[in-house]
Image (cartoon, rainbow, N blue to C red):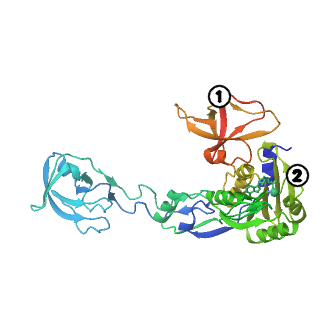
Amino acid sequence: MIPLDEARQFVLDRCTPLPVAAVAIDDALGLVLAEPVRSTGPIPPFDNTAMDGFALRAADVADAPVTLDVVATIAAGARPDITLTAGQAARIMTGAPVPPGADAIVMVELTDFDESAGRVVVAESVPVGNHIRPAGDDLQPDAVVFEPGTELTAAHLGVCTSVGAYEVQVGRRPRVGVISTGDELVDGPGPLEVGQIRDSNRHTLLALVSSMGATGIDLGVVRDDEDAIRAAMLDAADQCDAVVTSGGVSMGDFDYVKMVLDEIADMRWMQVAIKPAKPLAFGTIGSTPVFGLPGNPVSSMVSFELFAKPGIRAMMGHETALLPPLRGRAGVDLTRRSDGKTHFARVEATPGADGVMEARFSGGQGSHQLSAMANGNALAIIPDGDGITAGDPVDLILR
Ligand code: AMP
Ligand code: MG
């Protein structure tokens, strides 16, 4: 068996960033900037009010309560065509430009407006600048708003459009082909013949691919047949940036995936010192990484998390391919037997009284018991030994 870090480094060394592409901002969620985003002007672009109320001169209300003449109403989007002079105020709505001459806003709650008389009584004095959001308060002109390497989240997309960056230069979104292998697999709700199971891995793996911001390509189920697997692999490598398969990488008689990869890919078949997901066949067909994950449903998910996800993140241009685990603690004894492997236990992690995440087994720990994965929210990393005593620290991979 080889250590996890060594196996993962082998993978990461072969997963290089995809070419940069210009992508429309609404298609850029989760992608990684390859070039800086710059502001073209100040944000906000003009001095504006943070409140509905009255724009006025602070000096005029120093001896509040005072009465002022209301000379205009300024809505958001309006261009003020007045200049306030002493004794005047303008009704103003949140986001509207502060008119020339005004230097403060009094919120509507502190005023009494007599519309027919065109006058307002202001109850309190306010300092200069009150409730005014100055131009450039968020972003200065010509500032680098986001550096290369930034992963674009929902907020980033909003900021980009606010500075007029409707297209961004990012690492291209990887197309990841997903293939299930196995003669026992069927797809669909119909009754199962003896020996058959429904293909769950493909649906799970496609979801894992899209949840990390890549595009999953459903390449179906392939039989345990060397020629069929070879043809499917070559086709997948041709049309995708990376390929994820499940099944066929163990010691069984019909585990053809590793044999085919050995023949058509620059492949390494690894026995990694982890449980679940010990076997991994990883290689490249041309420059296309192929992740031959084990077939057991929990194993394929864990293997995806530990190898495919960092590899695909590296292809996307993420500076940290590997996200660090979170330090929590064992909520119960997380027992295990010593076997030379690091275990990744399916756990439910919930905040304890002090807010620290506490992990408890979320169900059966067999590699076929996918429901424990569904009913949990984390993998607890349990080093080789007898396990982790309740209350002791444990590293968690939150999913
Ligand atoms: P294998 O890695 O092909 O030896 O498969 C290991 C176990 O995982 C076997 O019990 C398979 O039936 C099961 N398995 C393989 N592929 C899938 C799949 N796509 N969905 C659900 N179970 C699978
Ligand atoms: Mg199989």
Position in image of residue 186 (x %, y %): 73, 63
- The residue singled out by tag 2 in the image is 251
Above or below: residue 146 compared with residue 278:
below
Q: Residue shown at 86%/57% (left/top)?
A: 255
What residue occupies the far left of the structure in this picture? 117
Q: Identify the secondary structure beneath mark 1.
A: loop
Position in image of residue 219 (x %, y %): 73, 68
The kind of residue tagged 2 is: Met
Using the image as rendered, state which of residue 312 and residue 183 is in the foreground.
183
The kind of residue tagged 1 is: Ala
Above or below: residue 41 compared with residue 272:
below
Is residue 248 shown to the viewer in this render? Answer: yes
Using the image as rendered, state which of residue 170 and residue 313 is in the foreground.
313
Using the image as rendered, state which of residue 224 and residue 310 is in the foreground.
224
- The residue singled out by tag 1 in the image is 390
Q: Residue shown at 65%/28% (left/top)?
A: 390
